[in-house]
Image (cartoon, rainbow, N blue to C red):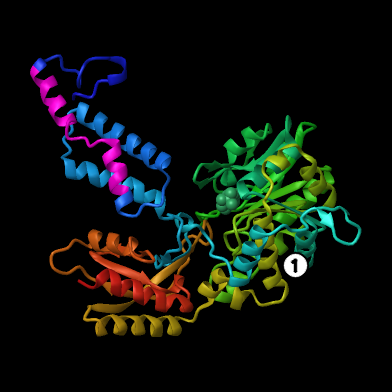
Amino acid sequence: MATDDLSSQPGSVAGSHDAESNGRAAELLREIPAVSAIMAEAKRLGSGLTDEALARVARGELDDVRQVMLQGGRLDRGEIERRVRDAISALERPRLAPVLNATGVVIHTNLGRAPVSSETAEAMRATAAHPVALEIEPESNERGGRMREIAGLLRALTGAESALVVNNCASAVLLTLAAVATGKEVVVSRGEAVEIGGGFRVPDVLRQSGARLVEVGTTNRTYARDYLAVTTGETAAYLKVHPSNFRAFGFVHSASTAELAVLGREHGLPLLEDLGSGALLDTTRFGLAPEPTLTGAIEAGADLVMASGDKLLGGPQAGIIIGRARWVERVARHPLARAVRADKTALAGIAATLRHYARGEAESRVPVWRMIGAPEGAIRERATCLAADLAQAGLVADVEAVEATVGGGSLPGETLPSWAVVLRSVDGESIDTLARRLRLGDPGIFGHIDQGRLLLDLRTVLPEEDETMARSLRRSLSP
Ligand SMILES: *Cc1c(COP(=O)(O)O)cnc(C)c1O
């Protein structure tokens, strides 16, 4: 392959020293348009970018094109111009625009996890747009803590003495371990030294915190006595980790939060619990397996509990740390706390979300719970309506019973009965091309392909989005 590193071989073209091929390359390079011509064309098409930005994008793109050509790739003028045009329009259109999640995965990490309630979104917008009394007490005009509101809400909801909110659950765990156990040992069950996904591995996080991992028990069975057997003067804490995205069943046992809390107290050691999903509602009420709750962990005696804000809690990205006041204070005072602190919009969003729970309205307001709790019959009705709407536009769509999942590293193997609109490709277009067309629609729609058909699961679309979805589908599907 002629892919020699050109930068280390000045003067050579694609590793060839042959004059004739040099000539051909030079000829190809002449296909590359001038930066000024690209800029003029972009302006003609109404680009709102500055001359400087346009010139940099054009130069960057053309450099890439030149590299491709020097390595033997062939790009004609039309292709080159299309590449540059795409690069420019990518800067002009926001990529993080709202899309519709019709994947049937309620908490879809690649689609930004939990969508928040309209009240939460408004609280975040207002907080972002204006100054807020983040660290000032309006009454006294003195400096105040940024956690007051959230700590109050979390105390009311879980019974925890104190709370701290940081960037995400991964940073909550890292910070907690660093504050509690640097230079000392943390005991973890072999069944819980897990990888959650996206680079979060319990043993690695422990190492980064400066703590030493002591694994106990076996992959399938660990008892409280296993923790006791390795408890020494070097032990700083016991760590319990919710395995989140996998489930062991059969001949399994793990020590409960309550057992480990008692053992910890007997030895003056805190029990830390990484819950991950951070549920505040009982999932069994929705026909699902039980997912540990923040309240349950506090009531069982955990000293510090960590969870995500954007999984089953249903708020914006954040890491929640609740527990005993003296431990929370120790975590909050650690220098790393500043490095992973949550911004004002996240704090406002978490507070607004928690307020839904405090008012007992989470099921009807928090999108994650609205999606989980939606009755199957209502979803079927919506799917039927949508299919009928498409039929009116001359498009063929069926409805089909499907199974949605909760996702977000919670409730593995659990499904929720749902209904999907089923699209088939027509006129020889591949199903992948059809799916791509929908993803690039306005707004984009993400479904999933199953047996050569595109399924759009309506459990993960809110009823108030149906109209938008129908419009986007009609636009994308009409010839
Ligand atoms: C998801 C998860 C994390 C990571 O949470 P982020 O909010 O993504 O940082 C950590 N621990 C557990 C047990 C999890 O399920």
Density class for disc 1 (Cα within 10 Å; few <14, some 14-19, many ≥20) is some
Which residue lies under the disc numbered 1?
157
Q: Is residue 72 above or below residue 414?
A: above
Element under disc 1: helix
> What residue is at 63 percent from the left and 74 percent from the top?
362
Left or right placement of residue 57 versus residue 82 in this view: right
Q: Percent x, y for residue 417? A: 43, 75
Q: Percent x, y for residue 324? A: 81, 53
> What residue is at 36 percent from the left and 52 percent from the top?
47
Q: Nearer the viewer, residue 160 or 5?
A: 5
Q: Which residues are magenta?
A: 20-42
Q: For residue 401, which quarter of the picture?
A: bottom left
Q: Nearer the viewer, residue 157 or 397?
A: 397
Quadrant location of the N terminus in the rendered image: top left
Q: Is residue 36 magenta?
A: yes
> What residue is at 63 percent from the left and 54 percent from the top?
318
Quadrant location of the C terminus in the rendered image: bottom left
